[in-house]
Amino acid sequence: MPLRIHFTVEDLARTRVADGPAPCIELSSAARQLQERSHRVRLGAWRHHTLSALHPSSRMALALMPPRGRITGFLSGSAGATPAELLEQIRSTPRARLRASLETTARHQPLPGWAHRLPDEPLLLRQLCDSLEHVAEHALVPHWQEVLAMTAADAAVRSRHMLNGGVEALLGRVNPRWVRWRAPVLEITTISGLDADVRLAGRGMLLQPAVFAVEAPVFDLDAVPRPVLTYPVARLQEAAALPLFATSPSDDGRTTSAVGAVGSALGHTRAAVLSAIAGHPGCSTQQLAVLVGIAKASASEHATTLRNAGLIDTHREYRTTAHVATPTGIALLNAPSGQL
């Protein structure tokens, strides 16, 4: 049986999609994925590259972010917009919250012996935060622009659902494999097989797209100010399983040379198409044609060329498309003219 979330009219009115990625969710999900062996096509190259770069000290942070079970609450920070802001919040966690968070986790699963000493040993806490920062610098930060791009593309897809069918269409299509809308109840199939009824009591829900949460949705009833449903971005729900990140941090030299080579081949119209997509992430092919002032067929042809060159991504659902510039495409637009 699924988890059943009961909505009132007030809940529907207060439900929205997050306006960007959540660093705390991306970092904790990335830490979990490093300790798994699943999703080898999408995450295999990233996992191998990241693990080969991690120092043994990373085990300290990973111990509090196990592949199964709870993530110790204080490691989630709060609403930091970037990984750096999240890490700063964690370093500044008050002792009272630290202690309460560890006690809550210990009631559900065992903790390493040293974890219980964190509230009383500042040096130990600094070591943990350094370990967490080390994991973030290798697993998440190098790919943050790609995370932003994929989240922006997902936001465009969800906005189209809202425009075409309102919040009920949004809920019904957020993650069809795992989530089903049976008004006024949202049924969520969880990996754990949780069977329960939850009432939002007028708080509504925040729908949080995530890149590293590549599988089932996760529902957090205790999130403040409203419960959060984390789900994989639209790209991860497409049929074809492709590597999540096109390049690794060690590919900087090749990426730069590729940008220069592709840039020299761009004509005026194609450059205008790329610029329009970068300025209007998630635009459809029809919208792209209007923005650039060309026929829809021509816009589709240019988008295909740019996609094959790795400068844009295109997300498809039913008969709609959503184009978004990749970090390589954005780098090309921002490159000094002398480098093209």
Image (cartoon, helix red, strand yellow):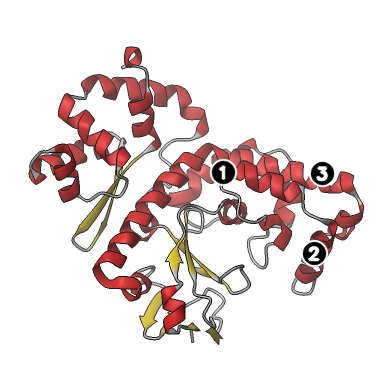
Residue in the picture at 83% in, 48% down: 125
Rendered view: 27 above or below 303 = below
Mark pair 3, 2: CA separation: 16 Å
The amino acid marked with disc number 2 is Leu
Bin the neighbour count of mark 1 within 10 Å (Cα to Cα): few under 14, some 14-19, many 20 and up.
many
Q: Which quadrant of the view contains residue 117?
A: bottom right
Q: Position of residue 70 (x, y in %)?
A: 68, 67
Instruction: Look at discs 3 and 1 and give the one toward the viewer.
Output: 3
Disc 1 is placed on an element classified as loop
In which quadrant of the rendered image does the C terminus lie? Answer: top left
Mark 3 sits on what residue? Answer: 126
Q: Secondary structure at mark 3?
A: helix
| As drawn, 67 above or below 244 | below
Q: Secondary structure at mark 2?
A: helix
Q: Circle 2 is placed at which residue position?
A: 102
Q: In the image as oriented, which residue stretches furthest toward the top?
A: 338
Near-viewer residue (114 or 170):
170
Judge left or right: residue 134 versus residue 241. right
Residue nearest the observer in this picture, 312 or 244: 312
Q: Is residue 207 left or right of residue 220?
A: left
Other residues around mark 2 within 10 Å, as few (<14) / some (14–19) / many (≥20): many
Q: Nearer the viewer, residue 39 or 223?
A: 223
Residue 54 in view (yes/no): yes
Question: Horizontal and vertical percent for residue 57?
Answer: 76, 42
Residue 303, picture quadrant:
top left
Res 239 visible: no
From the top left corner, tell me how far across and down residue 139 is, in percent: 58, 43
Q: Amino acid at mark 3?
A: Arg
Residue matched to label 1: 140
Of all residues, the one furthest to the right in this rendering is 120
Q: Position of residue 336 (x, y in %)?
A: 37, 17
